[in-house]
Amino acid sequence: MSKAKLSKPPHVHVYRDRHGKVRIYLNKPGQPKVPLPGPLNSPTFFEAYAKAIAGVKLAAPPTQPRAPKNTIAGLIELYLKSPSYRDLAETSRNTYRRQLDKFRDEHGTKPVEGFGRKHVMHILGKMADRPEAANTLLKRLKVLMNFAVDMDMIPHNPLSGLKGFKSDSEGFHTWTEAEIAAFEKRHPIGSKARLAMTLMLCTGQRRSDAVRMGWQHVSEGMITVRQQKTKATLTIPIHPDLQAVLDQTPKANLTFLLTEYGRPFSANGFGNWMRDRCDEAALPSCSSHGLRKACARRLAEAGCSNQEIKAITGHETEAEVTRYTKAADQKKLAKHAMGKLIVIDSVTQSANHPAKVSNSKD
């Protein structure tokens, strides 16, 4: 269940700036905006708010000194201002920032030069009970140290080739056909939940793309989406199952999926909302992201090549597609493969029929 939203006192404006930092202002009509300290509704905030409402001029907040450039903290500051970071999709930027901020809090004073494999292996070793989190952190640190090379802070990336933990986890659970049927039984055509599930299952898109899809993207039996993460534009044929659901969907709004307040979902908000809909269908292992994997699984089971699957899902590499299609039905694929072999054997036996062989000349 999503967290309750904090209420704001009158004339308080809260937003997140382009660097991901939360800004809080008193924005009283007819008066200049006054920056207030956070967190929102904390004792420090209320003390400053009371003074600002009364017209008392607040002391300027102390500026935080910049971290030395040769430290991990300084490197992270530079990276968060770099084009390579800012070119990431918003959801990726937020994820990267959370992970790097936490790492900076713990290891920010360490010098970049000399920060190598043994240090990282020691840090990852303490996360042995969380192998997936450790492997994700290793990916972020490799990116960070590559950036340090680009900035001429170090001659080479000391983490290049360093491997993380072996993990049996396959990430988000891939929906099975039985689970899809159970969800459809609980959420019939005409419900928002059925629309959301079918939209993701029949297009193979991420939730950040599904929440932006609408009637303006539909034309001549196709739906077009520009992926937020990769910036790739995909035009996907509308599956009959999706068409049946869209036929029962009103055309009054630009986006298919709206919150209870009539506004488009955020990616995280949609994920939380779908979590509740899955729970209603008694599917605790299922999630919105697992539908993208289920779409890839279905395509693989239908005999689609990796290139064909990428044309639907928008994956950029073979490895990504392989990871997503691990759950393809082995029995179905094995039958398909054996069927090909049987056909070949039949043709071979006909070509070498005993009668034909006996009549052949020596």
Image (cartoon, grey):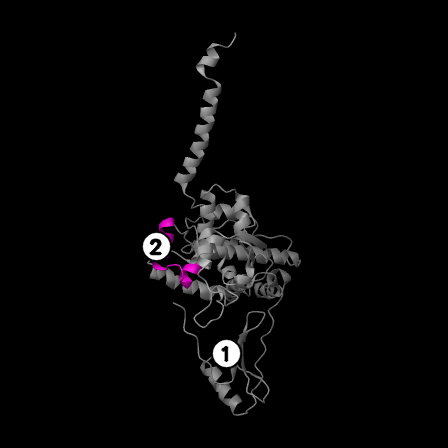
Q: Residue at x 52, y 92 (%)?
A: 54
Q: Is 272 inside the magenta-drawn segment?
A: no
Nearer the observer, 177 or 324: 177
x, y percent for residue 256: 49, 63
| Tag in front: 1 or 2 | 2
Crowding at dot 2, Cα within 10 Å, few <14 / some 14-19 / many 20+, comes out as some
Secondary structure character of the magenta stretch overall: helix
Q: Counting residues from the N terminus, which is met first, the one under dot 1 or under dot 2? A: 1
262 or 135, which lies in front? Answer: 262
Say which element carries label 1.
loop
Residue 336 in view (yes/no): yes
Residue at x-position 47% and y-position 71%? 262
Q: Is residue 36 above or below residue 355?
A: below
Q: Say which residue label 2 marks.
A: 182
As displayed, is residue 331 above or below residue 314?
above
Residue 67 tag number: none
- Residue under numbered circle 1: 38
State the CA–CA distance, disc 1 to disc 2.
45 Å
Looking at the rendered image, the quarter that the N terminus falls into is bottom left
User: Residue 328: where, in percent of width, then height?
Assistant: 43, 44
Looking at the rendering, the stretch of residues picked out in magenta corresponds to: 177-196
Q: Amino acid at mark 2?
A: Ala
Residue 162, image x and y in percent?
53, 49
Along the viewing direction, whichever of 329 and 184 lies nearer the viewer: 184
Which SS class for mark 2? helix
Residue 344, percent from left and from top: 47, 27
Q: Residue furthest right?
A: 152
